[in-house]
Structure formats: C-alpha cells, structure tokens
Image (tube, rainbow, N blue to C red):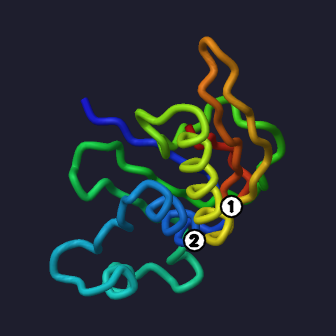
C-alpha cells in the first residue's frame, strides 16, 4: 500500500517546490509526451487560472511518500494536529546534532520557512529539535 501526504494550501506550486527542497525530493515531472505541466494542462483544456490548483513532490529514490498539494480557498487557522519531522541530524547527538539542525533551519528560512522555537536536548530521552513553519504556516520539526 502506498502513502500520499496531502497539504491544503493557497499556492500548490510554491509549496511543492519548498518541500521538494526541504526533503531532497523533486517536483513531479509532467506526464509522458509533455515537456512541461503547462503544456499538459493546456492540452487538457485546463484554463490558466486553474493551472496552480495542484502540484506534487516525489522522492527521486521512489521510497518516500508522494506529497500532494491542493489549493483550497480558506487559510490555515489553527495548529496542525499532525506534522512532519524532517530528519536533518540522524545519528548525531549533543552540539553536533544541534549544529546540523541549525544549518538545516537556516537553509529552509532562506527558502521561505519560519523558525518558531528551539528545544534543547534534555537527557535521558530528549535529543533536541527545532520547530519550524513552511511558507504557508504548516508546522514541522527539524529532528
């Protein structure tokens, strides 16, 4: 069984590009026979104002879930009940871990993310993480 994670958003193309960068994914290629999505959507009769109704990001290795972004009219209003953890420092601990998380946070802020809060490592179970929000305010953690 495959898993797809769906995001409601205002700008599917921009959010797909952000998450592709954040996760090392790529924006999904257009269907065979088309050089661009715009060409495909034109051929299918989709009017220009509807061409950013959806976008997707995929794992180039084919192992991670597809991320699907769909335009919705309402803005995000409350905290996410579910969020993604971006594993930016697997296997690292202490200061090395936090330095790797800080590097990832700086890279994603440059792409439009917002840094929300840093949680310091708290032994014995806490390894530290940084809470972020994507360009549309969806919370995620750098873990």
Above or below, 95 relative to 110: above
Above or below, 11 relative to 142: below
- Percent from the top left, x then y, of residue 134? 66, 56
Residue ranking furthest to the top: 124
Task: Give the residue drawn at x 56%, y 56%.
Answer: 104
* Residues packed near mark 2 inside 10 Å, few (<14), some (14 to 19) or many (20 plus): some
Query: According to the image, label 1 marks what residue?
Result: 113
Residue ranking furthest to the right: 77
Task: Give the residue drawn at x 61%, y 42%.
Answer: 98
Foreground: 100 or 30?
100
Task: Give the residue drawn at x 54%, y 49%.
Answer: 100
Foreground: 83 or 5?
83
* Residues packed near mark 1 inside 10 Å, few (<14), some (14 to 19) or many (20 plus): many
Task: Give the residue drawn at x 75%, y 53%.
Answer: 115
Query: According to the image, label 2 marks what residue?
Result: 14
- Mark identifier at residue 51: none
The reply to whether dot 2 and dot 1 touch (C-beta < 8 Å) is no
- Is 11 positioned to the left or the right of 39 in the image? right
- Percent from the top left, x then y, of residue 41? 38, 80
Q: Nearer the viewer, mark 2 or mark 1?
A: 1
Dividing the image into 4 quarters, which one contains the C terminus? top right
Q: Quadrant of residue 34?
A: bottom left
- Is 89 positioned to the left or the right of 113 in the image? left
- Is 53 positioned to the left or the right of 1 in the image? right
Q: Mark 2 or mark 1: which comes first in sequence?
A: 2
- Secondary element at tag 1: loop
Above or below, 112 relative to 127: below
- Percent from the top left, x then y, of residue 111? 61, 70
């Amino acid at each position: 069984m495959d898993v797809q994670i769906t995001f409601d958003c205002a700008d599917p193309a921009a959010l797909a590009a952000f998450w592709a960068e954040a996760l090392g994914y790529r924006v999904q290629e257009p269907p065979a026979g088309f050089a661009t999505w715009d060409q495909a959507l034109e051929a299918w009769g989709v009017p220009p104002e509807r061409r950013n109704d959806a976008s997707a990001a995929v794992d180039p290795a084919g192992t991670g879930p597809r991320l699907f972004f769909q335009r919705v009219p309402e803005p995000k209003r409350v905290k996410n009940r579910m969020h993604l953890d971006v594993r930016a420092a697997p296997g690292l601990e202490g200061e090395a871990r936090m330095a790797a998380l800080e590097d990832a946070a700086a890279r994603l802020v440059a792409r439009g993310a917002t840094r929300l809060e840093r949680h310091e490592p708290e032994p014995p179970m806490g390894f530290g993480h940084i809470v972020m929000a994507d360009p549309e305010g969806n919370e995620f953690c750098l873990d």
